[in-house]
Image: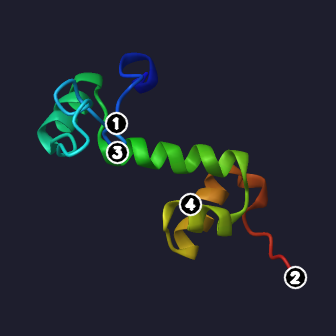
Amino acid sequence: MRQQTWPACSNPHLLVSSQTALDPSGPPVSKMLLATAFDRIGITARALWQDRVLNEARHSADPVHLMRLFAISDSTAMKYVHAAHPEKAGRVHP
């Protein structure tokens, strides 16, 4: 969507608004803008992040991959792998 809306955007931030998109020295979007956007769709940023981790765990049952990608602990990565692949829970790999 960002590429379609602002194809010439030079702002380095991942998330931009109509006010920050065209100014590379401009600030990132505000916490208030994000909170409003999440409230509008009925989800929290934390829930969205958890959904992304779980989705990645469904595609890759590799806990080390999850640890590197999301900067999470080994125990947290294993919880996501087990949630995504319950058939693997309890298995010990040599």
Task: Kindly check if marks 1 and 3 are in contact, taking CB atoms under 8 A apart as contact.
Answer: yes
Q: Identify the residue shown where x is 20% and y is 46%.
A: 25
Quarter occupied by residue 65: bottom right
Position in image of residue 43 (x %, y %): 31, 34
- Examine the rendered structure and indicate whether residue 34 appears above or below residue 40: below
Q: Identify the residue shown where x is 38% and y is 25%.
A: 8
Q: Quadrant of the N terminus?
A: top left
Write down the residue under mark 2.
Answer: 94
Give the mark toward the camera: 1 or 3: 1
Q: Earlier in the sequence, mark 4 or mark 1?
A: 1
Q: Earlier in the sequence, mark 1 or mark 2?
A: 1
Write down the residue under mark 4.
Answer: 69
Q: Nearer the viewer, residue 76 or 32?
A: 32
- Examine the rendered structure and indicate whether residue 38 appears above or below residue 86: above
Q: Residue furthest top?
A: 4
Q: Quadrant of the C terminus?
A: bottom right
- Examine the rendered structure and indicate whether residue 17 appears above or below residue 35: above
In whole angstroms, how far apart are the C-alphas of marks 3 and 2? 44 Å
Residue 12 image label: 3
Give the mark toward the camera: 4 or 1: 1
Task: Kindly check if marks 3 and 2 are in contact, taking CB atoms under 8 A apart as contact.
Answer: no
Q: Identify the residue shown where x is 80% and y is 76%.
A: 92
Task: Kindly check if marks 4 and 1 are in contact, taking CB atoms under 8 A apart as contact.
Answer: no
Write down the residue under mark 1.
Answer: 10
Q: Residues within 10 Å of mark 3 (few under 14, many from 20)?
A: some
User: Does dot 2 land on a helix, a strand or a loop?
Assistant: loop
In whole angstroms, how far apart are the C-alphas of marks 4 and 3? 20 Å
